[in-house]
Image: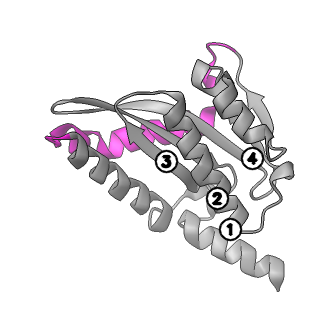
Amino acid sequence: IGLFEVVFSDITEIRFAQGRVYLAASLEAVSKRLIGHSASRSPDSNLVVGVCRQAKAYLKKLGVNLSGVIFHQDQGSVYTGYEYAGYLVRDSIKISYSRIATPSDNPDMESFFGRLKDEWGDVFAAAQTESEVIELINKALSYYNERRRHSAINYFAPDEFIKRELAAATA
């Protein structure tokens, strides 16, 4: 797999003092960068289409040919519905689905969400309001992209890894 060829997507539940929000995210496979994310009280099509919109905008900004990109996710109704799938195929993006009830088919997202909850779960749980937990989620994901080092990418943060890969490709 090359840089910007595969994007993993999924939704997870984040609990806080007054309830829960659903975090949808899109993760670029090679760099481990979150290229789209959003949180909402409802895990609906609007949530995942919004994240997809962010991811596509990020890829377009970098000049990625979207027809060479595969988006992989589970077979939940929000991902198989026309709103989401139609939004992807409009740009000739390929769609890949996990087998039904097989989270292990999307290990990068499962691993990411597990790590996020291990590292930030207590922080999220202490949030008193929905806006506070969303602010904390955004802070955690900025940290993840900008500063958290990953062994899978030679102990660079995702943003630094992408910067180096793009510089090397144009050198």
How far apart, in angstroms, are the residues tagged by discs 3 and 1? 17 Å
Q: CA distance from mark 3 to mark 4?
A: 16 Å
* Residue on which the image places disc 3: 37
Residue designated by label 2: 57
Q: Write the start and end of the magenta stretch as one range.
A: 100-129
Going from the N terminus, do you reach mark 3 or mark 1 first? 3
SS at mark 1 in the image: helix
Asked whether the viewer can see residue 169, the reply is yes
Mark 1 residue type: Lys
- Which residue is more in the foreground, 108 or 154? 108
Nearest to N terminus: mark 4 or mark 1: 4
Is 128 or 113 nearer to us in this picture?
128
**Label 2 crowding class (10 Å Cα cut-off): few <14, some 14-19, many 20+?**
some
> In this figure, which residue is indicated by the disc labeled 4?
6
Does 111 appear in magenta? yes
Horizontally, residue 11 falls left or right of residue 62, namely left
Residue identifier under label 1: 61
Circles 2 and 1: CB distance less than 8 Å?
Answer: yes
**Where residue 26 appears, x then y in whole percent?**
58, 45
Contact between labelled residues 1 and 3, with CB atoms less than 8 Å apart = no
Q: Is residue 136 above or below residue 10?
A: below
Which percent across, then down, holds residue 144?
A: 45, 58
Observer-side mark, 4 or 1, equals 1
